[in-house]
Structure formats: C-alpha cells, structure tokens
C-alpha cells in the first residue's frame, strides 16, 4: 500500500484530513495541531499544498491517530460542512441501518406480530 | 464439547498477557502503528470505519452455554450490546476500544476463547459442518480432524507468515454443509468400497476478485497421513506462491498457474520426505483428541412422540417452523434446531447480548448446554429432545430467533459491507433488509423454496456472493453504489460459481431485480417443486437476464 505521502495529491474541491483515534478508533478530523471529532471544526482546504502539509502533520502524529487520509467534504451555503461521499457520511454518522441496541421493545414486538401475520398457510 | 487442557489454557493466557503489553506500548507511543498492526492482526483486531473490530474464533462452530454467555458479556461490557456471527464461524464485535481490548480478551480467555489466527497471513479458524457429531449423514465427527489440524497449525512458526491467509475446512458428511470447495484447503471424508475411510484433499479454492473452486489433488488420503499431507501442501504453497503481489498470493492463484496436477506433484515430492516421520499420526493421539469431545448422555427416546404430532396439528405456525428449522438427529427421539438470525428488519448474523444469554439458557434447558454456529450466519441447538420442541419453539419465538425462513429467500448471507467495513465499496445490510422485506410473506418465500442469496459489499467476497444462487456484489461507480448480479452459484458438494448476468444495477433497483428473478423462476419452473437452482440449470440464465434487463 502506497503511503498517502508518496501519492500525488489531486484536489478538485474542499477537503479535510481524517483518521481514527488510537485509543478507541473513533473518527477524528485534523484541526490545528490536534484532532477533533466534529467535522464542522476540522481544518478545510482547497489547496494541494495545504492538504499535503495537513496530511504530513497528521501522519507524524502516530501516537494519537491512525490511518490518516485526505477526504472530500461539501460546504453548505450556511457555512456548514458535510461529508463528501457516502463512506465519509457513514464514518461521521454511523451505520445507515438501525443498530440492535437502538431497536425498541415496541419495534421488536411489532416485528414479531408482523411475522406472525405472514405465517398463514 | 471439546475439553481443553492446561496447555491450551496456558497458551491463551500467555497470549492475553503479551497483547496487554503490546497495547500498553502502542498507547504510550513506544510502538508505532506500523509496528503494532501485525501484532494486533495476529489477535483478530482490525480497524474499521468507526472503531476497532475484534474477531473471535469459534472453533468448528461449537460453543458451550458458558462460552455464549461470555460472548454476551463481551458484547454488553465492551461493545454496543450485540455481536455479528460471520461466514467463517467467528463472531465479530464492531465497536471495541483498543484501550479495553486486553480486558475483553482476558474475559474471553477465561472460557478458552481467543482471536488468535482469525486474521493475518496464517492458517485461520478451521471450519466444519455445524451439525458435526449429530448429523445422520456423517461418517464420523469432523471436529476430531479439525482439532488435529488446529493443534498442529496453531502458532506453527513455519506457517505464521504465509504469503496470504489460508482457510481450511473439514467435512465428513454426504452433504457438504461447510462450503468445502471455496476453501484454500478442504478435507472431505469418504468411505471406499472396502469400507475404509480416508480424506479427499482439495486445494486452491477461494473467492475474492479471482474466484476458483478447489481442485481435488488426492482422492483418498489415509487418515494417518492427514497432518503430513497438510504440512506438505502448506510448505509447497509457502515456497512457490507469489509474495510480490498481494492479489496473486493466495494458493488458488498458484494452483491455477501451475495446474492442479503439477501442484499435486510438488506436494507429493514434499510429502514423500515427511510422511513416515513425526507427523504420521499415532492412532493413540487421535483417540485422545477424539476422547476430549464429550457427547451428551442421550436418553433412549422414540422418534415422533405423539404430543409433537398433536402440537403440529394444533398450531400451523409451529408446524411451519418444524418443517423449516428442525431436522433429524442421528439419535432417535432427538432433533437439530436451527435458530434463524435473519428476522425481518434485522441484520443477517447479528445477535444481541440478551438473545445470546437467552439462547445459552435455552441450550442448558434443552440442548445439553451446547450451541452451534453455521457459516450461513445462523445458530443451532444440536441436541433437542423432540418432545421438547413445542415448548422450545415458544421460547425461541419470544426472543426473535424462530423465523421459519432457514434456507429460504430471506435467509440471506451478507457481509457487514460499507456500514462497518473499511474495505467495502457499497452497503450489504440494507440491501439484505430490503430484499427480506419484499419477501416477508413466508407463504411466498416457501413457494419459492430453497433459494440462497449472498451479498458482498466488495470484491473480497466475505458474503460469498459467487456461490449464491443469486449473488449480489456491491461496486462503486462515480461515487454511487451499484450492484452486479450473478446467478447459479452454489456452495454444496456440487459447487459452482455464479454467472454475471449483465451490467450492474443501482442501489434502489436491487430488490426489484431479485423480485423479477423470482417471478421469472415461478413462470419457468417445470413443476412447483423444481428448485430455483434446478430451473436455472435447465432453462439457462438467458430468460432471467431478459426479464431483468427488458424493463431497465
């Protein structure tokens, strides 16, 4: 696998540098000399030179973050920041499916009733 | 159950201590990620999209109730209250923190469980038939041989840094329930005309971007030679496989490039030099391992107790579940019960901590404390007295694992896909959920009969899409999720790779396509009991292709 530092950086829009936090694997974004878990707070650039500086510093911070790479973002008219693709949306927001822990008792019961309704022969 | 000894317990405990030290050094900065990564991978620890993932081996898919309770505890204490059973008889936790991993591993070790060799370029968890030891059609318990091989390859220094991962499966039954032909190496026990038993050895199977079915290189291997022959295969692979290209490093590429015959010759040359040495199996050693598998003290019971028939007659839902999820046991009066982890709206293979605890309790009450995990991502209770089935069904129904869809269109095998996995290009789980929702009417699903759908979120094929009757592979095109559809794959004794039917379809159309394929099958089948896969073999894929693409 080629290191991000050895790759030519091509940027066609705003980007951030993202990684996973070493201690718990949480998604983090490069901000200043450190990291933030909020995409809104991340350093954003449209410059390849600045992106290289960001990724170089991020990779050097091996103690705190792992797997740094440059990821696209979208800027909203209201000054907000959105992930630039589905993968980054899922990294920020979590799985697109309902997790078992979040399934309410009512949902489970309703689902079971629904199954029962379809067992007719 | 298999009874581990002090050697096994010490080995696992020492590994936990080693890993605790390695994690501490990583967190302090003493180890860089480049240095730490191979160490964590040796313990089944990956980094995924949102967190670390811990993969824990379930050797030959056999769990005690105590072990299942521990899996529930780990899910609850260190994860988010659930775990995901995989196509290789492992369980994965998707939200584990590195800081807590040593404690989680210590808890698992307290019941003899670990993540050793569940990742990395080594011999992975050896899989087998989830009905091992209880299936009426087996010659003998395959777990004995899986365990013989496991003991030899665990931490084997020569095989800890193979060119790539190496997956072994063992089967001893007439029906292949372990997907043998898609493994790097598979052992299938046969009985010859003289009544002797020996193993057919198959090598070079595997899916991924270059799928191959394993080829037989030894039709009948004496049991005494199992270890020496496996060793010879691994040595030949280790010596000749391409380490320069990760995409060409699996044994399937080597066997394909050399040809099965030439590969077999190389193996044989190696084998001749070691077959009569220390690896020739002493029957006493095999007997000792076999003796560590403890079987229940079954009662003398008759098949088909009258109350069972009455219960089936009284409740058609129970009868439907009996027809779908319960099969014969080798002992009269007993049954094997499959617990569907594919409820409508659920994630294939997921079980909550509460479900795991409840299943463990039910195993204690109804299955001599034993649970099985199958590669189809369902669980099984292997030793249920038939007279207990009505009561057990009520209990299983109450915890959501009695959906009578085993082997049907909604019993979908799916990898975690882009919702969790850093390798994935597209989502698998929501596709599975949408298809299951379209076929939630179990009358329709039963009418369709046996129909296996397999979904992978990338070309690495963890969802075994190549061998699904309907295979679905997620790809990414210009930032959008698309899905390739294959038809006609199967993973049984007559294994076959599916055929791509045409251009990939967008995310929103996948369930429609499956409905179209199902509708075409109903129109094309020669009679109501002609299975989908048989209709496909008879009619070819063209009418299905036309049906799918005519409307698009």
Image (cartoon, coloured by chain):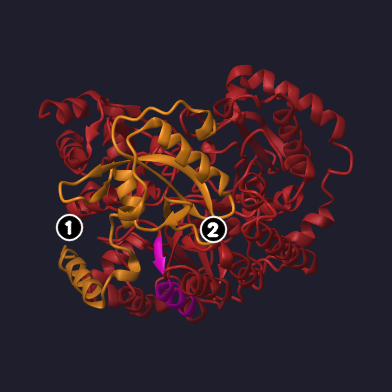
Chain colours: A orange, B red
Quadrant of res B263: top right
Residue annotated with mark 1 = B441
Describe residue A56's horizontal placement relative to residue A121 as left or right. right
Specify the subunit that label 1 lies on. B
**Residue B121 lies within the magenta run:** no
Residue B522 coordinates in the image, percent (x, y) = 17, 40
Q: Residue at x 56, y 61 (%)?
A: B98
Relative to B531, residue B347 above or below: below
- Residue at (44, 74) in percent of width and height: B359
Mark on residue B54? 2
Q: Are marks 2 and 1 on the same chain?
A: yes
At label 2, counting other C-alpha atoms closer than 10 Å, the crowd grade (few under 14, some 14-19, many 20 or more) is many
Q: Horizontally, is B64 left or right of B456 in the view?
A: right
Range drawn in magenta: B350-361
Whether label 2 touches label 1, CB < 8 Å: no
Place of residue B4 in the rendered image (x, y in percent of width and height, measured from the top left): 72, 67
Residue B319, image x, y percentages: 27, 68
Residue B240 in percent (x, y) is at 71, 24
What is the quadrant of the C terminus of chain B in the image? top left
């Amino acid at each position: 696998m080629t290191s991000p530092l050895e790759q030519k950086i091509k940027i066609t829009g705003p980007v951030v540098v993202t990684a996973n936090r070493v201690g718990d694997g949480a998604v983090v974004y490069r901000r200043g000399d450190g990291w933030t878990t909020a995409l809104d707070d991340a350093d954003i650039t449209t410059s390849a030179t600045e992106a290289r500086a960001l990724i170089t510093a991020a990779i050097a911070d091996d103690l705190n973050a792992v797997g740094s790479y440059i990821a696209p973002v979208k800027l909203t008219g209201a000054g907000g920041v959105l992930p630039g693709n589905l993968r980054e949306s899922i990294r920020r927001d979590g799985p697109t499916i309902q997790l078992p822990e979040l399934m309410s008792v009512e949902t489970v019961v309703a689902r079971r009733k629904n199954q029962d309704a379809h067992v007719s022969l | 159950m298999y009874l581990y000894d002090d050697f096994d317990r010490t080995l696992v405990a020492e590994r936990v201590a080693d890993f605790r030290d390695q994690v501490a050094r990583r967190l302090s900065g003493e180890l860089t990620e480049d240095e730490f990564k191979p160490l964590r991978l040796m313990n089944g620890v990956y980094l995924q999209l949102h967190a670390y993932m811990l993969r824990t081996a379930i050797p030959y898919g056999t769990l005690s109730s105590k072990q299942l309770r521990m899996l529930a505890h780990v899910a609850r204490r260190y994860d988010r209250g659930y775990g995901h059973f995989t196509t290789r008889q492992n369980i994965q936790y998707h939200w584990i923190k590195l800081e807590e991993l040593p404690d989680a591993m210590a808890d698992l070790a307290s019941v003899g469980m670990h993540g050793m060799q569940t990742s990395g370029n080594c011999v992975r968890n050896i899989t087998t038939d989830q009905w091992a030891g209880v299936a009426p059609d087996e010659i003998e318990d395959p777990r004995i041989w899986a365990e013989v091989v496991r003991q030899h390859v665990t931490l084997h220094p020569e095989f800890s840094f193979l060119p790539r991962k190496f997956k072994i499966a063992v089967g001893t039954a007439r029906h292949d329930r372990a997907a043998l032909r898609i493994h790097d190496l598979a052992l299938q026990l046969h009985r010859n005309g003289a009544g002797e038993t020996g193993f057919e050895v198959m090598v070079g199977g595997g899916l991924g971007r270059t799928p191959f079915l394993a080829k037989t290189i030894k039709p009948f291997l004496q049991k005494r030679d199992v270890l020496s022959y496996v060793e010879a295969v691994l040595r030949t692979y280790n010596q000749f496989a391409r380490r320069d290209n990760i995409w060409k490093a699996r044994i399937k590429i080597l066997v394909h490039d050399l040809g099965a015959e030439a590969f077999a010759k190389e193996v044989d040359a190696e084998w001749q030099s070691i077959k009569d040495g220390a690896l020739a199996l002493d029957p006493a050693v095999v007997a000792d391992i076999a003796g560590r598998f403890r079987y229940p003290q079954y009662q003398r019971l008759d098949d088909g107790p009258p109350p069972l028939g009455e219960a089936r007659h009284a409740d058609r839902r129970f009868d439907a579940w009996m027809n779908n999820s319960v099969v014969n046991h080798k002992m009269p009066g007993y049954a094997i019960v499959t617990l569907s982890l594919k409820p409508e709206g659920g994630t294939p293979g997921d079980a909550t901590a509460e479900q795991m605890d409840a299943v463990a309790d039910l195993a204690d009450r109804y299955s001599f404390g034993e649970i099985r995990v199958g590669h189809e991502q369902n669980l099984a209770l292997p030793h249920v007295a038939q007279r207990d089935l009505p009561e057990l069904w009520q209990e299983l129904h109450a915890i959501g694992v009695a959906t009578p869809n085993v082997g049907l269109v909604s019993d979908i095998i799916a990898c975690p896909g882009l919702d969790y996995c850093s390798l994935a290009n597209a989502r698998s789980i929501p596709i599975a959920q949408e298809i299951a929702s379209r076929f939630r009417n179990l009358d329709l699903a039963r009418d369709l009969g046996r129909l296996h759908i397999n979904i992978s979120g990338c070309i690495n094929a963890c969802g075994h899409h190549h061998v699904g009757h309907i295979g679905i592979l997620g790809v990414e095109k210009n930032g959008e999720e698309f899905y390739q559809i294959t038809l006609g794959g199967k993973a049984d004794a007559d294994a076959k790779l599916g055929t791509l039917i045409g251009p990939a379809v967008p995310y929103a159309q996948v369930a429609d396509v499956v409905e179209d394929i199902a509708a075409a099958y109903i129109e094309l089948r020669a009679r109501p009991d002609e299975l989908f896969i048989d209709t496909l073999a008879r009619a070819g894929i063209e009418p299905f292709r036309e049906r799918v693409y005519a409307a698009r």
